[in-house]
Image (tube, grey):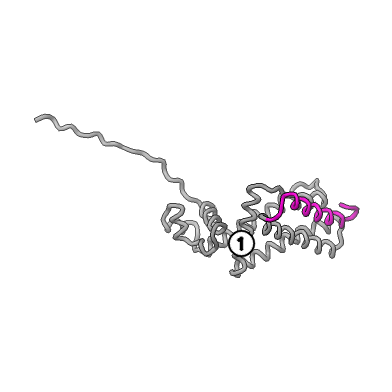
Amino acid sequence: MGAIKKKAAVVTTSEPKRQLTREDWIDAATKRLVNMSVEAVRVEPLAAEIGVSRGSFYWHFKSRKDLLEAILGRWRENQTRRIVERIKQDRRLGAREQLSQLRTLRGNRRADDAAALELAIRAWARRDKLAKRIVSEVDRERLEFTISLMVEGGAGEADAQSLALLGYAYTIGESLLQDVITQEQIAQCRGHILDQQIGALKDGG
């Protein structure tokens, strides 16, 4: 009999899967919120979409509510507090320049994504107490920042409040009407509101 030849074992190696982070889950959940609704943000469909087990979710979150709070927290941080800090960090800027920066935040893909998220969260807030509370707090923070800039620049309290509200109401309306208004109209409206706000400052800022 001939010798029996043993087949060499074939060893295959594959790249280890990257461990999902808390931020990965929030990213995936936020996309579902924007593309569908808050009702679509549930653990099992999210896990299936990402390609992991449901148990992986609980390494990072206690519950679905914990995830929803994280979505709202990141929205608040990215779309309000970081913008405020970015504008305030350059101490050389006066009230006029800071108002100008706030009113002329550039439009780009990220801005479009932010506007879509803003609308999704506001739709969610119409039906949910937690989201409603966070949205109300964010609205107050944004308004108070503009009011404080104008008052620091010498505007009267009443003018600062009414013009801050006018500017903020326009900003929310702009996100609702993106498919209807042109970039030229947006630039004109932003410029008109900025002129009114700067005009209310002491000696025009």
Q: Which residue is mark 1?
A: 121
Give x and y (percent) for residue 5: 18, 32
Which residue is depicted at the point 60% across and 60% down?
120
Give x and y (percent) for residue 74: 60, 56
**Most common SS among magenta residues:** helix
Name the quarter where the N terminus is drawn.
top left
Which residue is depicted at the point 62% across and 68% down?
126
Which of these two is toward me, 6 or 116? 116
Q: Which residues are magenta?
A: 180-205
Give x and y (percent) for residue 88: 75, 51
Which of these two is toward me, 50 or 2? 50
Which residue is depicted at the point 67% across and 59% down?
176
Q: Is residue 45 magenta?
A: no
| Image-based side of 43 in relation to 81, left or right | left
Which residue is depicted at the point 49% across and 57% down?
60
Which of these two is toward me, 165 or 154? 165
| Position of 51 relative to 123 (above/below) | above
Q: Is residue 200 magenta?
A: yes
Query: Can the viewer see residue 88 in this picture?
Result: no
Give x and y (percent) for residue 118: 64, 58
